[in-house]
Image (spheres, rainbow, N blue to C red):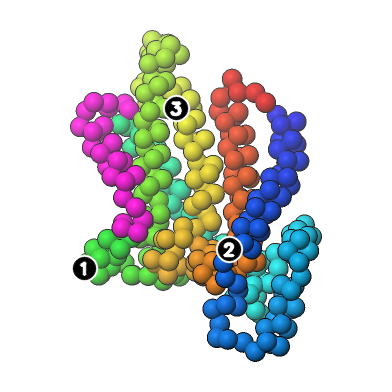
Amino acid sequence: MLRYLVGRLLGLPSVLLVIVTASFFIMRVAPGGPFDMERALPTEVRTNIEAKYHLDESLVRQYLRYLGDVARGDLGPSFRYPDRTVTELIGLGFPVSLTLGACAIGLAVVVGGTAGVLAAIRRNRLVDYLTMSLALGGVSIPNFVLGPFLILVFALQLGWLPVAGWGTWRHLVLPSVTLGLFYTAYVARLARAGMLEVIFQDFVRTARAKGLREAVVVGRHALPSAVLPVVSYLGPAAAGALTGSVVVETIFGIPGIGRYFVTSALNRDYTMVLGTVVFYSLLLVVFNLIVDCLYAYLDPRVTY
C-alpha cells in the first residue's frame, strides 16, 4: 500500500504537467485576447501592457515561463483583477466553494445513502418505488432549472429564504439543495444497487442464520461492501462539488471559484482560467487517491 501511495504521489507532477500543457495551448489558440474586450487602446499603451504580462514573447517562451512559475507555486497575476494574484483569488473563493460543496456532499451521503439502503431493504415496495422515482427526478433535473424553481417557491412565494447572496446559514440552504440534489439522487441509486448485490450473498445469510438482528446484519456485514460503488463515485463528485458549481454560484450570486472561472473565461483571463484548472485537477487527483485508500480499507480483497 505504501509503495502504491508513493507511486501515485510521484506520478502527480506528470499528470499536472499534461493538464497544464493542454490547458495552456488550448487557451492560447482560442480566438480573442485578454484586452480585446476593452476599448481600442493606443498602440504604445497596448505594447506596454503586453510587455508587462510577457504576452509579446513567443508562445514557447510564455509556456516555459508559466511552467517555471507553477513549479514555484506562483500562478501569476490576474488580467481581470490587476491588484490580485490568481493564488489570492482562489484563496478568497475556495472557502466559499468548500462550504457549499461540503454541504452538498454531506446531503448526498446522509440522505442519498440512507434512502438507497432503505429502498434496497424494502425492495419492490412503496418505499422502494417512491425513493427511486424521486432519485430519477433528481438525476434528470438540471441545476439551471432547479435553482430558479427553488428561488421562485421558497424565496419569492413563501419568503422563507433569501433569493441570493452569502453570509448566513439561510443563504446556504437553497444553493446546497440545488448543487446536492443530483449527487444525492445518484448516491441513492448506487447505494440501492450495491446493497441489492450483497444482501443475498452467503456471508449475509450466515449472519442472519446466527440470529443477529437485522440492523446488525445490514449495518455491520452488508453495508461495508455495499458502499464500495458509492465510495468510488464520491472521489470525483467531491472534487467537482468542492470547487463549486459554475451554474449554482452564478444563479445564487455566490463568490466562489466558479464565479471567478466564468468571469475569467469571458474576459480571456488566461492565468486565472489556467490557475483554476490546475487547482481543480490537483483536487481531483487527491480525492481519487483518498478514494483508492478507502476502497482498500473497506474491501480487504483489494490489494495494491
Residue 298 place in picture, x, y as percent: 55, 28
Q: Which residue is mark 1?
A: 157
**C-alpha gap between disc 3 and disc 1:** 41 Å
Give the extent of the magenta segment: 120-146
Amino acid tagged 2: Ala
Residue 34 percent location from the top left of the image: 60, 74
Relative image position of residue 140 (x, y in whole percent): 31, 46
3 or 2: tag closer to the N-terminus: 2
Residue for point 43% across, 11% down: 202
Q: Is residue 242 visible?
A: yes
Query: Measuring 58% from the left and 86% from the top, which residue is drawn there?
Result: 40
Q: Nearer the viewer, residue 38 or 189?
A: 38
Left or right: 283 in relation to 179: right
Q: Secondary structure at mark 1?
A: helix
Determine which residue is flagged by label 2. Answer: 30
Q: Please report the residue visible at 28 percent of the width from the left and 67 percent of the height from the top.
A: 155
Q: Nearer the viewer, mark 2 or mark 1?
A: 2
Q: What type is the residue that disc 1 sits on?
A: Gln
Q: Quarter of the image containing the N terminus?
A: top right
Is 125 included in the stretch rendered in magenta?
A: yes
Q: Give whichever of discs 2 and 1 has the lower sequence position.
A: 2
Principal secondary structure, stretch drawn in magenta:
helix
Quarter where residue 127 is shown: top left
Q: CA distance from mark 3 to mark 2?
A: 45 Å
**Rendered position, 71 above or below 205:** below
Residue marked by disc 3: 226
Q: Count neighbours of disc 2 (C-alpha within 10 A) and say few if under 14, some if 14 to 19, many if 20 or more.
A: few
Number of other residues with Cα within 10 Å of mark 3, as a class: few under 14, some 14 to 19, many 20 or more: many
Nearest to viewer (mark 3 / mark 2): 2
- Residue 172 lies in quadrant: bottom left
Which quadrant, please, contains the C terminus? top right
Residue type marked 3: Ala
